[in-house]
Image (spheres, helix red, strand yellow):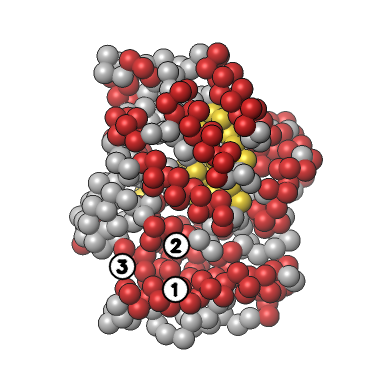
């Protein structure tokens, strides 16, 4: 612990001082308490909430599974409060059931992947039969790297980050294009048990959280949920995503994720289609981010694109101020031309440069005018 304190102070002193900000500490209160081992992570409690049927029974319809899920979801919040009221000791009061709320989520997730409707593309590919979806993923969980990330938002570092292959977006400026689009399947194939062992290792060696990212983690939801069966340490689970998942996937992640780290990239559907090749972006992303905000702690990221202040940055920040008042916001200034923008700059003239200082300052001005809390986490 002393070594980690020295490391943080030398490289990211704000990772320590950020917790002296009462607004940050209040808005991330659940995450903070789990990070400090004062309360259990949600997934650990979901493993203790018993259900009275075998959700893996192949004869059970998905409609029946959803009904069981809804019944468990109705009692989970009260159950979590009871368990967490005694801190981690509350976990010892309950015997591990044969089948749990988490098992129901896992069983449904594997149904949703075959045919696949984990994200709003709903491509319907039979991924468990080895056929890749639009995201390029099939029946395997593919991890390209995992490590203690020191470059995330101050409350999160060191973040136990797991980079998954594949993505349901096709961003022309993607900075991780090698693992998301070009060589997404070149990582290591892992079992859910092996994925769990990575999470345990990262936590035991000092990670404040487990950061599921990519690419995007959405195509890997069934495998990630299954991995939680084998994670036996208390650690906050963080969902770092473009938030283009289906409503069904969002229901599965609720009551499991302790802190959300979503992107809200675009302020309209036209920019989303031209630059990321996704339809109905605004409706889907805002629906899911609103739901995430209402279910837990959240830091919303917005990457400022050059020439996109009026069409994207302004409507994004206005929506956040109106709809997610508890959210902390990271207005990101690190955009740079990458991937197809570099290859075909004439096709993407509007974003073929870095943002100007004046554009970043305008984004900050809008955020200040709206009363958003963004500086403590940027």
Residue 206 appears anywhere in the view: no
Q: Nearer the viewer, residue 199 or 15?
A: 15
| Residue depicted at 51% across the width and 49% down the height | 290
Numbered mark located on residue 111 in the image: 3
Please report contact status of discs 2 and 1: CB closer than 8 Å, yes or no: yes
Q: Work out which quarter of the rendered image holds the C terminus and state it.
A: top right
In the image, 260: left or right of 214?
Answer: right
Residue 41 at x, y percent in the picture: 61, 62
Q: Nearer the viewer, residue 68 or 93?
A: 68
Numbered mark located on residue 158 in the image: none
Residue 86 at x, y percent in the picture: 75, 71
Numbered mark located on residue 69 in the image: 1
* SS for dot 2: helix
Residue 129 at x, y percent in the picture: 21, 62
* 3D distance between C-alphas at marks 2 and 1: 9 Å
Q: Label 2, on which residue?
A: 251
Please report contact status of discs 3 and 2: CB closer than 8 Å, yes or no: no
Q: Quadrant of residue 358?
A: top right
Q: Quadrant of residue 331?
A: top right
Residue 321 at x, y percent in the picture: 58, 38
* SS for dot 3: helix
Residue 136 vs 138, above or below: the answer is: above
Residue 363 vs 349, above or below: the answer is: below
Which comes sooner in the sequence, label 2 or label 1?
A: 1
């Amino acid at each position: 612990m002393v070594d980690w304190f020295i490391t943080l102070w030398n490289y990211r002193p704000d990772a320590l001082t950020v917790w002296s900000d009462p607004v940050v500490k209040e808005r991330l209160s659940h995450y903070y308490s789990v990070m400090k081992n004062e309360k259990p992570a949600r997934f650990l409690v979901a493993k203790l909430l018993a259900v009275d049927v075998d959700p893996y029974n192949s004869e059970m319809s998905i409609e029946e599974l959803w009904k069981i899920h809804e019944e468990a979801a109705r009692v989970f919040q009260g159950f979590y409060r009871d368990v967490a009221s005694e801190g981690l000791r509350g976990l010892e009061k309950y015997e591990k059931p044969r089948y749990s709320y988490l098992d129901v989520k896992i069983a449904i997730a594997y149904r949703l992947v075959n045919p696949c409707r984990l994200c709003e593309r709903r491509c319907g590919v039979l991924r468990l039969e080895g056929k890749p979806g639009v995201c390029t993923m099939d029946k395997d969980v593919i991890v390209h790297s995992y490590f203690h990330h020191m470059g995330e938002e101050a409350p999160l570092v060191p973040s136990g980050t797991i980079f998954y292959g594949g993505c349901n977006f096709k961003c022309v400026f993607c900075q991780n294009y090698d693992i998301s689009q070009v060589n997404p399947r070149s990582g290591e194939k892992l079992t859910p048990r092996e994925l769990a062992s990575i999470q345990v290792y990262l936590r035991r060696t000092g990670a404040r959280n487990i950061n599921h990212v990519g690419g995007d983690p959405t195509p890997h939801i069934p495998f990630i949920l299954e991995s939680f069966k084998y994670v036996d340490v208390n650690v906050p689970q963080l969902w770092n995503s473009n938030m283009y998942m289906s409503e069904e996937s969002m229901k599965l992640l609720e009551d499991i994720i302790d802190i959300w780290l979503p992107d809200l990239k675009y302020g309209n559907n036209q920019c989303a289609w031209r630059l990321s090749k996704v339809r109905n972006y605004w409706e889907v992303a805002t629906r899911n981010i609103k739901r995430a905000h209402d279910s837990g702690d959240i830091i919303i990221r917005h990457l400022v694109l050059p020439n996109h202040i009026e069409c994207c940055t302004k409507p994004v920040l206005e929506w956040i101020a109106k709809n997610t008042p508890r959210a902390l916001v990271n207005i990101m200034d690190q955009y740079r031309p990458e991937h197809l923008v570099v290859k075909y700059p004439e096709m993407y003239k509007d974003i073929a440069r870095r943002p100007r200082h004046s554009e970043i300052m305008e984004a900050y001005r809008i955020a200040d005018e709206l009363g958003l809390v963004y500086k403590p986490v940027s």
